[in-house]
Amino acid sequence: MSEIFTPALSTKSSQLEKRVEGFCLIIAPVLFAASTFFWRNGEYGVEAAMLIIFSMFFWIPALRSLFSLVKNEMPRYAVWGLWIAVFGCISGVCFAFLGYLVTVLNISHEQYLNLLTNYPVTSQILLFGSGPLFPLSLLVLGISLIVKRSVPVWMGILFCLGAISFPLGRIPPRTPWIAHITDLALVAPCAVIALQILGNTRRRSA
């Protein structure tokens, strides 16, 4: 496998930062994948919501690591693309918390959709309008990684596959088997990149 680009680690703090990002690249997609097994009748429920919220927390440094792979050749995209992806994570937290609340308060899918129509602007900002930003960011990132050859092509293809299948499995009525494909497509390249980053930091700190 070709060497994945990793920025120079000149200080102990930068080594620690990359090590944390490496662990997050493993934890974030794994927690997200685990959440799919806890769906209840097409809703996230309490357990899945908790896992998604924690996953999105870890996705933020994980995304920072992924966007750093293209920052030398695409500096503007690396900065603004990361900001957009992070907001997509925030929207993911909002969707997960919505799933938590509707379960705890025993509100049906139709009921909460009707209630959200009373708040069209904020619902678009926090949920429906911003929701696609996370998978869309992964799709553009996957294409960028392929074009710039920052990672092996198969990794970029898996990011694109995960991004495309993401809404297909998670737009209600949610389809678990499609969501599992998404999860696997994201876990595999993230884990490989993470292991290489962690191996690089270990060698430099030795």
Image: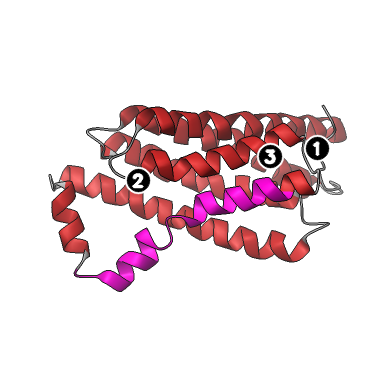
Residue 4 placed where, x, y %?
Answer: 80, 37
Q: Secondary structure at mark 1?
A: loop
* The magenta stretch spans residue 83: no
Disc 1 target residue: 4
Residue situated in front as seen by the camera: 94 or 8: 94
Residue lying at 66% horizontally and 37% vertically, measured from the top left: 157
Residue lying at 46% horizontally and 42% vertically, measured from the top left: 166
Q: Quadrant of residue 126?
A: bottom left
Is 16 above or below relative to 123? above
Please give left or right for residue 8 compared with residue 114 in the image.
right
Q: Is residue 61 visible?
A: no
- The residue carrying pointer 1 sits among few (fewer than 14), some (14 to 19) or many (20 or more) residues within 10 Å by Cα, namely some
Q: Which residues are magenta?
A: 118-144
Disc 3 target residue: 156
Q: Earlier in the sequence, mark 3 or mark 1?
A: 1
Q: Secondary structure at mark 3?
A: helix
Q: Earlier in the sequence, mark 2 or mark 3?
A: 3
Is 77 above or below relative to 193? below
Please give left or right for residue 40 compared with residue 171 in the image.
left
Disc 2 target residue: 171
Question: Mark 2 to mark 1: distance in Å?
Answer: 33 Å
Question: Mark 2 to mark 3: distance in Å?
Answer: 24 Å
Query: Pointer 3 and pointer 1: residues touching (CB < 8 Å)?
Result: no
Residue 113 placed where, x, y %?
Answer: 20, 57
Residue situated in front as seen by the camera: 177 or 64: 177
Instruction: Quadrant for the C terminus, please.
Output: top right
Residue 47 placed where, x, y %?
Answer: 31, 34
